Amino acid sequence: MSISAEDVQRIGELARLHLEDDELERLTSDLNAILRHVDSLRDLGSTKRSEDSSQLGSKLTPVSAEHVPDPDKLIDRPVDFAPEWQEGFFIVPAPPGVKPSGDQ
Amino acid sequence: MSPQVEVLGSSEALDSRGSALRSLDHIKDLESGREGLNAFLAVAEPEDLEPCGQGPLTGVMVALKDNICTKGLPTTCGSLMLKDYRSPYEATVVQRLRRAGGLIAGKTNLDEFGMGSSTENSAFGPTVNPIDRSLVPGGSSGGSAAAVAAGYVRMALGSDTGGSVRQPAAFCGVVGIKPTYGRISRYGLIAFASSLDQIGTIGTTVLEASLLLEVVSGQDARDSTSAEKPVPRYRDAAVQGIEGMVVGIPTEYFPEQLDTGVRALLDEACERLVAAGAEVRPVSLPHTEFAIPCYYVLATAEASSNLARYDGVRFGTRLPAEGLDRLYELTRGNFGTEVKRRIMLGTYVLSSGYYDAYYGTAQRTRASIAQDFRTAFDEVDVLFTPTSPTPAFPLGERVLDPVSMYLSDVFTVTANLAGIPGLSVPIGTVGGLPLGGQLLGPWWGESRIIAAAGALEASYEEDT
């Protein structure tokens, strides 16, 4: 998987790092070199050995170059499993031995 | 109890305050001269030499890696970001050291925020190896290892996120121990990758590194990841012997490309373990080859989150700017190249759409690596491997090639990923440079690896 200078610029914005042109060029090259090495993790998803040696190995997800949108599951109010909701927080029962904050 | 332990525990034989003061002057003289190693970023002042109690370290000078918070002395993490930082509190390990009678000699150089394998990434210049000044001392606890190897201090504390105590100990010819995750409180250790970080000890001998481990270990209410487990007398383990111990040799740690001189020393060390009463047998850790990519995904992901706090508002040397966004950007320009590189990589692997492909896969790989060790320790008591594929390399050789630098940790990162204890002990020299052998033990098995290292050390001492 390779990333472009535009990708690196965008990552810099997310990380709140201002990158000069020479830094951008160097980081693009460095990150691509590192990602080529890191991409070997995808081998785990397909090798027989990993299936033999560990149950977890057979469940590994191969690295994909495709950007698959995966919206946060909490983007909508999760009424099914958290019916009580106040100011953006779930209302949950107090743990045993702890008084609810309203009683303090 | 061995004669050495009696020496360390006997108040008559220990450094008095007067000799401690002379030691500080000696360190200052050496470090400020042409022969200085740049091992220390700050040397203690006489008023800093106040112990809080008496114990097994009474009068013993100990150096601290400069990512461990101290009151009085600065805590810079080797970064311009914290160049003026004075911690308002003291790390738990510092309190335990002082309660045991130890004296803080100063703060040692490191790769910025612990990110590096050579101590060349410090904002305050590289530390050089006391054995050969043209070589790196290893990293990121290179200042601590160099200070012990040079004889400035007898013991030092470092931190080990992927081998940062064991690899510099190997490069400088001293002993380094990274205990089980949770053995030592991380309260007051400035975070790099919280699920991997662990404070470790460095000493000139197995006994000294073990004694320091014994002093600083134990549960701490201020670190919820510290374990409620009794601390054994590690100093006794160093001399208990290894009769009947089963030592596993993982085939994946002895690749064909391993230098023949390095392999010869490792083979000799195995023969010495057998001569000391151990049984040696091959084992397999099949996910080892994925450890480095797994480590660099997880460590950078955690680093990108941990280092978000350095924004000039919460922490960090604030640079004047108009507007909050510009303030953040300018302030975070204080980070050095390697730290920026890792924050960028960590931000990328956590970003939407790539999270499961990288971070999720790496987490599952981590579980597989831990399972490999669990299986191996059903058959053997400890594992023996090289600490690093090579001895110390020249300054500047790998600083422009991050992948090459990362691969120098190939044999050490697995212990951090699994959370097991590891120890590096000198096993001779190759081309005149010290080489380290690594002993890995099961969770909470520090005593076993200390015993094996003590037996190896004793075997080499018999030759001299």
Image (spheres, coloured by chain):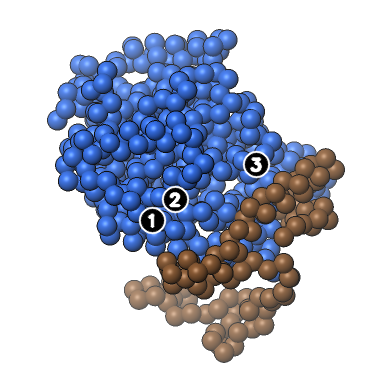
Chain colours: A brown, B blue
Name the residue rendered at 49%, 30% in the picture. Answer: B391
For label 2, the SS is helix
**Chain name for mark 3:** B
**Is residue B361 positioned above or below B457 on the image?**
below
Name which residue type carries label 2.
Glu
Image disc number at residue B200: none
- Disc 1 to disc 2, C-alpha distance: 7 Å
Q: Contact, CB < 8 Å: mark 1 with mark 2?
A: yes
| Chain of the residue under the numbered disc 1 shown in the image | B
Secondary structure under the numbered disc 3 in the rendered image: helix
Numbered label tally = 3
Chain-order first, disc 3 or disc 1: 1
Picture residue at 28% right of the left edge, 29% below the top: B457
- How far across and how far down the image is residue B299, in percent? 56, 52
Q: Which residue is mark 2?
A: B252
Q: Amino acid at mark 1?
A: Ser
Q: Residue at x 25, y 38 (%)?
A: B273
Mark 3 or 2, nearer chain start? 2
Q: Nearer the viewer, mark 3 or mark 1?
A: 1
Disc 3: which residue: B402
Tags 3 and 1 touching, CB below 8 Å:
no
Quadrant including the N terminus of chain B? top left
